Structure formats: C-alpha cells, structure tokens
Amino acid sequence: MGKNKLLYPSLTLLLLLLLPTDASVSGKPQYMVLVPSLLHTETPEKGCLLLSHLNETVTVSASLESVRENRSLFTDVTV
C-alpha cells in the first residue's frame, strides 16, 4: 500500500479499559480517549488516553480490528 492511504477501509480502534466497578457510581468521568479518525500507513499516528481519579491499578490494551486481521498496538500497560 502506498503512503498516505488507509491501512484498511474498515479499520477500527478498540480500546479496553478495566476500571474498578465503582468508577461509574461517582458520576465523574474516569477516562477520556482521543484517536484520529483516519490512520495512514508509513506515518506515525498518535492517540491520547487520560486517566483521572484512579485509586486502583488499571490495565490498558488497544488493537486495530479489520476484516482481514487484528493487530495489537500495545498490551498489558499497567498504570
């Protein structure tokens, strides 16, 4: 694939956060995720994950999913 073309047309970023079960009770956001709407090949892309008011260890993993394959961006990042 050439430069500046989409990696896969149906590319989706899946972010999985394992937060404490009582995180939703407070009513305040515990995390925010920002990712680009288009991801290009041969070009570095960045995303942002903001975690706030954590009182437990959080494990984060992210992967790109398409019809052809799933690719892990990173796994088992512990904050």
Image (spheres, rainbow, N blue to C red):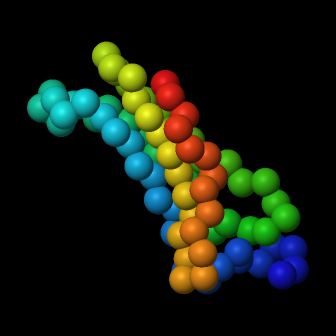
Q: Nearer the viewer, residue 69 or 1?
A: 69
Residue 73 lies, in percent from the top left, at: 63, 52
Percent position (x, y) of residue 4?
81, 73
Q: Against 78, is 44 above or below? A: below
Q: Residue at x 55, y 58 (%)?
A: 63
- Tell me which corner region of the image, top left, top right, bottom left or bottom right, holds residue 43: bottom right
Relative to 42, is 27 above or below?
above
Residue 42 in view: yes
Front one among 68 and 3 = 68
Residue in the image at 55% along x and 34% along y: 77
One can see residue 34 in this view: no
Residue 57 placement, left or right of 71:
left
Q: Residue at x 30, y 34 (%)?
A: 19
Q: Where on the picture, by quarter, is residue 10?
A: bottom right
Decide if residue 8 is on the left or right side of residue 53. right
Please give left or right for residue 46 compared with residue 42 in the image: left
Residue 17 figure quarter:
top left
Farthest residue, direction top: 55
Counting labels gives: 0
* Residue name at image x 79 percent, y 69 percent: 41
Location of the N terminus (image quadrant) = bottom right
In the rendering, at what x and y percent does residue 47 appear? 60, 47
**Left or right: 28 in relation to 60:** left
The x, y position of residue 11, in whole percent, is 57, 74
